[in-house]
Amino acid sequence: MSVRILALVGSLRAGSHNRQLAEAAVKHAPAGVEIELFEGLAEVPFYNEDIDVEGGVPDSAARLRAAAGQADGFLLFSPEYNGTMPAVLKNAIDWLSRPYGAGALGGKPVAVVGTAFGQFGGVWAQDEARKAAGIAGGAVLEDAKLSIPGSVTRFAETHPADDAEVVTGLTEVLRQLTSQAAPTAA
């Protein structure tokens, strides 16, 4: 039985370095770990309780919740936009926090990593994502961190999957995350 990790990428940009970082995690996932890179965060509408009603949940939000419900843990990839996490990642966390007290993040381990152009690699954004995921019910792994600075230059000609230091850091985060995730029956 494998451990299923749902990866959510907070950047929608084509060629996103955080998307590439998520692809590196998929490529270098240890044996027995399946990482699903969720597609479709751009289609999930902003959270609104008026549309979060039985029979009215938008298909894109229902797909996100279903994927999260099948996950044993979460790996969030966050760039830094104006000192905080991108709205698309916060919105995903908001949808996964509901219904109140029974959201899909509930008690499952969450790790947050990322890369950004700045000298700190998006640390503020990643801290905000940890905070939001924890309030939403996730069991945030505060010590499972990877913040890679200088993304524009560092990954100009090298994919993160081919950067030995990045792969080592990702592997350690995945080790910590999967050690806390209890596999669910398929």
Image (cartoon, helix red, strand yellow):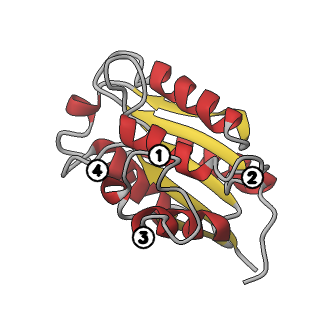
Q: Position of residue 136 (x, y in %)?
A: 67, 40
Say which residue label 2 marks.
Answer: 108
69 and 21: which is toward the camera? 69
Query: In 3D space, how far apart are the residues under numbered discs 4 and 3 (Cα atoms)?
Result: 33 Å
Say which residue label 4 marks.
Answer: 159
Q: Earlier in the sequence, mark 2 or mark 4?
A: 2
Is 19 above or below relative to 78? below
Q: Earlier in the sequence, mark 3 or mark 1?
A: 1
Say which residue label 1 marks.
Answer: 48
Q: Amino acid at mark 3?
A: Asp
Q: Earlier in the sequence, mark 4 or mark 3?
A: 3
Q: Earlier in the sequence, mark 1 or mark 4?
A: 1
Mark 3 crowd level (few <14, some 14–19, many ≥20, 10 Å Cα): few
Mark 4 crowd level (few <14, some 14–19, many ≥20, 10 Å Cα): some
Q: Amino acid at mark 2?
A: Lys
135 and 116: which is toward the camera? 135
Disc 2 secondary structure class: loop
Q: Position of residue 27 (x, y in %)?
A: 45, 65
Query: In 3D space, how far apart are the residues under numbered discs 2 and 4 (Cα atoms)?
Result: 30 Å
> Outermost residue, front direction?
50
Q: Earlier in the sequence, mark 2 or mark 1?
A: 1
Of tags 1 and 4, the one toward the viewer is 1
Query: In 3D space, how far apart are the residues under numbered discs 3 and 1 (Cα atoms)?
Result: 14 Å
Q: From where the camera sits, is residue 166 visible?
A: no
Please name the residue shown 35% across and 44% down the image: 18
Q: Is residue 38 left or right of residue 2?
A: left
Do callouts 2 and 3 mark residues in contact (Cβ within 8 Å)?
no
Please name the residue shown 48% across and 48% down the image: 92
Of tags 3 and 1, the one toward the viewer is 1
Mark 1 crowd level (few <14, some 14–19, many ≥20, 10 Å Cα): few
